[in-house]
Amino acid sequence: MAGPTMDSEVFAQRLSQLFEQARRPDGKEWSALQVAKAVSATGVATSHQYISQLRSGERSNPRFVLVEALATFFSVPVSYFSDNTVDDMLRRLVDPSSGIEL
């Protein structure tokens, strides 16, 4: 089953935004290694290098199953990565000033 089309620049920006704003329970930023380990533990093989490359835009077109796993990890809908009409509510989900916790 094919997933939505991903614009690599938009994907990289949104993944970076999640890393910057979605925090670990101790308030620190998640590392690519931590995210890769958590995603891999769900059965979706990936590496911290690949996550970093997706985040920087160096790599693009991730498998849909990886996009799903990242969305689940960061508690956002899959459409967060591809929908060019992401509404203000979704943006507030990853905005710490909104008062909404992930």
Image (cartoon, helix red, strand yellow):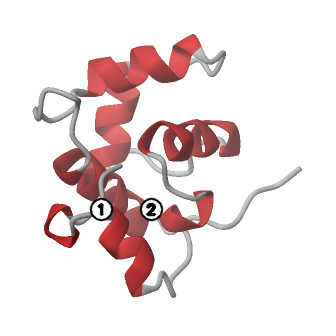
Q: Earlier in the sequence, mark 2 or mark 1?
A: 2
Q: How busy is the neighbourhood of tag 1: few (under 14 within 10 Å), some, or many (20 plus)?
A: few
State the residue position of label 1: 100
At which x and y percent is residue 98? Answer: 21, 71
Q: Which residue is rendered at x = 17% and y = 61% of the image?
A: 96
Furthest-front residue in this view: 99
Residue 52: which quarter of the image?
top left
Q: What amino acid is at disc 2? A: Ser
Q: How busy is the neighbourhood of tag 2: few (under 14 within 10 Å), some, or many (20 plus)?
A: many
At which x and y percent is residue 8? Answer: 44, 62
- The answer to whether residue 46 is seen in the rendering is no
Q: Nearer the viewer, residue 4 or 37?
A: 37
Q: Nearer the viewer, mark 2 or mark 1?
A: 1
Q: Which residue is rendered at x = 47% and y = 50% of the image?
A: 60
63 relative to 101 in the view: left or right:
right
Q: Nearer the viewer, residue 34 or 25?
A: 25
Q: Are marks 2 and 1 in contact (CB under 8 Å)?
A: no
Q: What amino acid is at disc 1? A: Ile
Q: How far apart are the two marked residues, 2 and 1, measured between alpha carbons?
A: 27 Å
Kind of element beneath mark 1: loop
96 relative to 58 in the view: left or right:
left
Q: Which residue is rendered at x = 35% and y = 74% of the image?
A: 91
Residue 31: which quarter of the image?
top left
At which x and y percent is residue 44? Answer: 63, 22
State the residue position of label 2: 8
- Relative to 72, say whether 4 is above or below: below
At which x and y percent is residue 80? Answer: 50, 66
- The answer to whether residue 43 is seen in the rendering is yes
Q: Nearer the viewer, residue 7 or 92?
A: 92
- Relative to 9, say whether 12 is above or below: above
Kind of element beneath mark 2: helix
